[in-house]
Image (cartoon, rainbow, N blue to C red):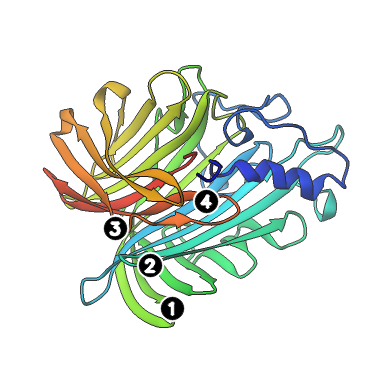
Amino acid sequence: MKPKVPALAIIGLLAGLLLTGCDDKPTEEKGFAGLADDAADYAQVTPGKPFVFPNDHGPHNDFRIEWWYVTANLTDSEGQSFGVQWTLFRNALPRPKGLQGDVSGWSNRNLWMGHAAVTSEDEHFAAERYARGGVQQAGVTLAPFAAWIDNWSYTSQSATDDPLADMQLQASGPQFNYQLHLKATQALVLQGNQGFSQKSEQGQASYYYSQPFFQADGSIDIDGKTYQVSGPAWLDREWSSQPLTDNQTGWDWFSLHLADGNEVMLYRMRQKTGEPYLTGTWINKDGSVEPLAATDIQLVPEETTDVEGRDMPTRWSVKIPSKALEVEVEALNPNAWMNLQIPYWEGPVSLSGTHKGVGYLEMTGY
């Protein structure tokens, strides 16, 4: 059995290793991915934040961790299914006293990490990038909007009131590359309580919004073969400083595109002791949202697959009785293992039952 390393756990470690030479020595992490560490040196997540766009599309350098996260469920002209993932993570070390703002050069306190992957029914390939902040290796700008790490990028294609409404996405690895155009059909949505997404009974939380109404088209290349593809895509944006407790071992996250035009987001935060913490959002096809409490959600693993020595739940029963939703969620490729420095499972899923649809599943900490 291989050691169980949770997704993102290595971010804090690498931040310490890469930035130790600047001034601080890395300290031992507590809890899942170090995200239960004391957050006194960072900004705090509190209810009632007024979201301001486009500013909140950019970095929040006073917070410890944030990400720009895109997934797409795609098909080609022959009906073959594929999945694409693109993620940019920003992680910050505490600032020394007297150091304000997002400084340039080697005094910058940010570490950037990129993940990209493509998945088909038979294959799954992933790649990663790491970069220091302040030296133009990676970052996010607002005018125009661009998120990048090396030559991977997620960039705005038109100047509109919503800079994320028309996007170009690209990344590559040794055995894959993709170029996708993403066009939003509705406004973005705030998750949780007006963007305040609670992650534990103790009150840990993140700021969280999504664009679940992207339509994507473009090309993907897998092992030298090119496919013209299209389908729904989803952007997640989260930032926090202490989103988890040291009792939480990882999460199972679902983004579901229902065939009737509605969307669903579900989080299942697993704990060392006690029942998992459940939260979610029902997103109506008109863009209005309905927060889901734990009592609204039934989320049960039904079948596991041995993946790299881990029992990964690759078929789930998902029920939301108030919405008459009762579906089986099954992985397109049960072996969609992100075999990177930070190993975790991430891949496309399909739905059957009372509702048809597709989506994405991320499982960390197994």
Mark 4 vs mark 3, foreground winner is: 3
Q: Which residue is mark 4?
A: 68
Q: Is residue 231 above or below residue 219?
A: above
**Residue 283, how many percent across, how many down?**
28, 40
**Residue 24, how many percent across, how many down?**
85, 38
Q: Is residue 57 above or below residue 299?
A: below
Q: Which residue is mark 3?
A: 332
Q: Earlier in the sequence, mark 3 or mark 1?
A: 1
Q: What element does badge 1 sit on? A: loop
Q: Earlier in the sequence, mark 4 or mark 3?
A: 4
Q: Which residue is mark 2?
A: 123
Dot 3, how many residues are within 10 Å of its Cα: few (below 14), some (14-19), or many (20+)? many
Q: Is residue 73 above or below residue 101?
A: below
For the residues bearing labels 1 and 2, Cβ distance under 8 angstroms: yes
50 or 316, which is in the foreground? Answer: 316
Q: Which residue is mark 1?
A: 223
**How far apart in space, not on screen, are marks 4 and 1 (Cα)?**
27 Å
Identify the amino acid type marked 4: Trp
